[in-house]
Image: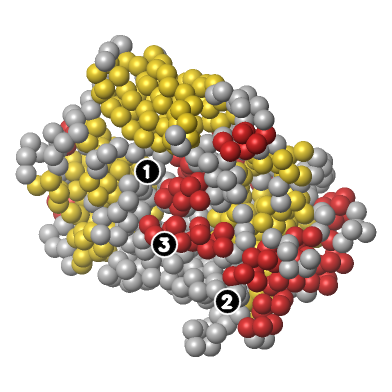
Amino acid sequence: MPLNKYPRPLLRRSTWVNLNGPWRFLFDDELRFRRPADIERWPLTIEVPFAPETRLSGIGDTGFHRRCWYQRDFVANQEAGGGRTILHFGAVDYHARVWLNDIPVIEHEGGHTSFSVDITHALLASGQQRLTVQVEDDPHDLEKPRGKQDWRLEPHSIWYPRTSGIWQTVWLEQVPTSYIGSLQWTPNVERWEVAIHARVAGEERSTLRLSVRLQAGEQLLAHDAYEVVTNEVHRRIALSDPGIDDYRNELLWSPDRPTLIDARVQLLSGDEVLDECVSYTALRSIGVQRERLLLNGRPITMRMVLDQGYWPDSLMTAPSDEALRRDVELAKQMGFNGVRKHQKIEDPRYLYWADKLGLLVWEEMPSAYRFTSKAVRRTVREWMEVIERDGSHPCIVIWVPFNESWGVPDLATVPAARDAVAALYHLTKTLDPTRLVIGNDGWESSATDVIGMHDYDSDPNHMRTRYGPEVKPQEVVDRRWTGGRILTLDGYPHRGQPVCLSEFGGLSYVDPERYPGHTWGYQSARDKEDFAARVIALLEVAGTTALFSGFCYTQFADTFQEANGLLYEDRTPKIPMERLAAAVRGESHR
């Protein structure tokens, strides 16, 4: 069975039921059916969690379909883990309605975030249970966050095939009548402590306690229990500060030393353990000082690669958990210490591997492409769900609500658009004050902690001249135009924030045996050696220019017609890994 690992790495229990696999399926282009009982025949079978547009789904239909339906049967064993049964969806694009045994149980809007529902009330006493899902995903709707999904029938330029319906794992979990509903972790390196915010769900009880055990390897860091008040526990857990940097560094999380703190959390009633889960956190801080980015209080150059998170046979869904791990490993092997996940909220399993293996992540909200009140409401609602779900992953260091003014196209002239960016910036800082936020990456910067700059000039000499040491940073940041857009908006001059070259490169190389059809890139290399030489020269400029506190090369792998990856779409490298890694780390010019 594909994608058979526990889907929620930050709150894991010992038992669960994976509902991935074959489901009954149909397209409902005429919007004929309103409820499961209306459907008499299911003409297709789909392999969940792969979207119907993918080859791995068994369907591979990339046409326009506004509505589709899923159905499968399962057996629920309510005695396996307690008194409640919870149904979880990793992600469904875009509007899902769910029935169990013809009883409506939940609706959810938003194509990139998880949702769950207690289905105990709708379960039959025994035997087969019938689960039905209706999904509406208008392919022409530009008011919803859709990221890189093309609104045209055939993908063009930098846009890719659409993803409709279920595209992440569906699963069941048996829990007690009172159980741990959510966990959030917030580290504080300055105070040498970890905060836990836990919510208890299900049946209310008056004398519950939460036991928390934190351990790094064989070292016990903390073990205590806290009273549950109004179904919540919010406590700061002080750790013993080792004092000397050598010992502190062993416990701090970084790409070079990704130390995780394992957590075992138990819900107690007296001496009885009602519920138990395992999780993890890490001691890690991200900040700025003058023009530099700081990781754990020390300057760091973010050497990143832009990653679209697509696979040729499965689009936004990884073909396996091993494929997610492999992408993290490949980024590190190429010398990068981070990735900018572009226009995609990634599967939590990817974030788990980034946490475990040590890879910094910029998490970026997929864009809507019209500026309306409806689009803003949808974006805000889904973005809040993203921050709540992923905020405990130590790998995430920067949130990016907007990219290149997509969805807010008239920032320079429309006050409401500027207010939208400022609002998302401040909302994000309010929900997560521990991380940096780039309000709008690329150009037309306003409310932001970091100035993100995009420049796709593929001539290294031009780049050296434009950003060389004789050029004053203020001249670049406040007077630089890129892509026909001013880098900083009037009223938001550069206030000393770090500057990152957050998109550059984009050079394509096409192997004619691999790509017989049309391909796209910002500029094209003549041959393989020309590609390698120009990529390495651009990386050297980005890595040695004092103006930049970080860079992000475009891009990780070829993605459909966009052939400007450092890897082919099957993740085969175009440049020898050792040569590329030396350039990324700034070693090839020494």
Identified by mark 2, the residue type is: Lys
Q: Earlier in the sequence, mark 1 or mark 3?
A: 1
Relative to 171, residue 532 above or below: below
CA distance for labels 1 and 2: 34 Å
Look at the numbered disc 3 and give the secondary structure of its residue.
Answer: helix
Mark 1 crowdedness (10 Å alpha carbons): few <14, some 14-19, many ≥20: some
Q: Which residue is mark 2?
A: 574
At horizontal 60% and vertical 74% (from top left) the residue drawn is 576
Relative to 470, residue 382 above or below: above
Q: Quadrant of the C terminus?
A: bottom right
Closer to us: mark 1 or mark 2? 2
175 sits left or right of 473 in the view: left
Identified by mark 1, the residue type is: Arg
Q: Earlier in the sequence, mark 2 or mark 3?
A: 3
Residue 44's x, y, as percent?
20, 67
239 sits left or right of 298 in the view: left
At horizontal 59% and vertical 49% (from top left) the residue drawn is 255
Q: Which residue is mark 3?
A: 323
Q: Nearer the viewer, residue 110 or 152?
A: 110
556 sits left or right of 127 in the view: right
Coloring basis for residues? secondary structure
Please say whether residue 363 is visible from this viewpoint: no
Q: Which residue is mark 1?
A: 8
